[in-house]
Image: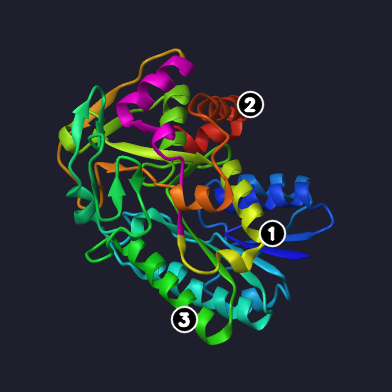
Amino acid sequence: MRILVTGGAGFVGSSLATLFKRDWPKAEVVALDNLKRRGSELILARLRQAGVTFVHGDVRVAYDLASVGGFDVMLECSAEPSVQAGYDGTPSYLIDSNLIGAVNCLEAARRHKAAMVFLSSSRVYPMKALRDIPLKVSGERLVVPPGARGLGWSDRGIAADFPLTGARSLYGATKLAAELLIEEYRALYGLIAIVNRCGVLTGPWQMGKVDQGVFVLWAARHLFGGSLTYIGYGGVGRQVRDFLHVEDLYDLIKLQLDRPADWNDRPYNVGGGPALSLSLAELTRECRNRAGRDIEIASDPVDRPYDVPYYVTDTGVVTDRSGWAPKWQTAEVLDDIFDWLRRHQDELRPVLAA
């Protein structure tokens, strides 16, 4: 077995690579990455210690993928992950990485008759439609009223049949376009491809920023110092996201790869669900308790065009099909992040502090 992980020095890619190598020690696991994101260089020692082969390469360059050679499974984790990408400048890198890169990955998988796991995003769902979901205030968070439901949404969260008409950000558009290409490759070439639309993924070795990796960023600022801001929706931190520890994602992918053809039919929504969700205000309280101190939380009530007040994943289809459910609970996820930050604070502080 030879497994190629694109974006293999990123948070999700490196986590999956090391976990697969741990559980399948006889497999050759290759991590390909261009090391563009700050902090990815810190991952290299982790990959080496796990026995993962690192290749410096870029999915935008077909030759770099070809130079890796044959493989049996591709975990397509490469992406420019920022939903803000392109809003304050050119979208070229975003489109080249997420769309042209996806085409190059599809071609490589087709040539080698390999199965693909494609990590898509909850950002494929249109922003206005998500904003139109009726919400009410409950303590420090926004909630869907119990029993309320509409097409593709309910108090259980957002399902994969949520309507797709409307703008979704350039990042979301590249992910949806890649999904459409995957559908064509399935039909034309018989490609086996599993598409998981992931919500917020988190855990150790995520180099969190405001636009991607907010749970780690919030924890790091509380521990290392620096300011944070509640942006939009009144500037009080009631917006809500669910989250999933990366090891729970790994458990699902491992299960899916046992019978990949059974998961080749549609996209699947993957996340923590209502039980693993926090508002920013609630996250602040949890981080304050673990760090043992308060930090300044500024308030900016102006809504941003790329943000939504509420996203929680309805994982019912995945759970009904497989029995999979997250094992990591809220306190355990946050404890794991804080423990990692403390153990590696000397190398992480320059990357994650303000």
Specify how the rendered protein is coloured. Answer: rainbow
Residues at marks 2 and 3, CA–CA distance in whole angstroms: 46 Å
> Residue 313 at what x, y percent from top left?
39, 46
| Residue 9 visible in the current orientation | no
Query: Which tag is nearer the camera, tag 2 or tag 1?
Result: 1
Residue 343: mark = 2
Is 283 magenta? The answer is: yes
**Relative to 344, residue 310 above or below:** below
Which residue is tagged 1?
258
Q: Residue at x 43, y 55 (%)?
A: 81
Residue 181 sits in quarter = bottom left
Residue 41 as seen in the image, left or right of residue 142: right
Secondary-structure class at tag 1: helix
Which residue is tagged 3?
184
Magenta stretch in the rendered image:
268-291
Secondary-structure class at tag 3: helix
**N-terminal-most mark, 1 or 3:** 3
The kind of residue tagged 2 is Arg
Q: Residue at x 44, y 67 (%)?
A: 98
**N-terminal-most mark, 2 or 3:** 3
Location of the N terminus (image quadrant):
bottom right
Q: Are marks 2 and 3 in contact (CB under 8 Å)?
A: no
Residue 57 sits in quarter = bottom right
Question: How many marks do you count on the picture?
Answer: 3
Question: Magenta: predominant secondary structure element?
Answer: helix
**Relative to 245, residue 195 above or below:** below
The kind of residue tagged 1 is Asp
Residues at marks 1 and 3, CA–CA distance in whole angstroms: 23 Å
Residues at marks 2 and 1, CA–CA distance in whole angstroms: 35 Å
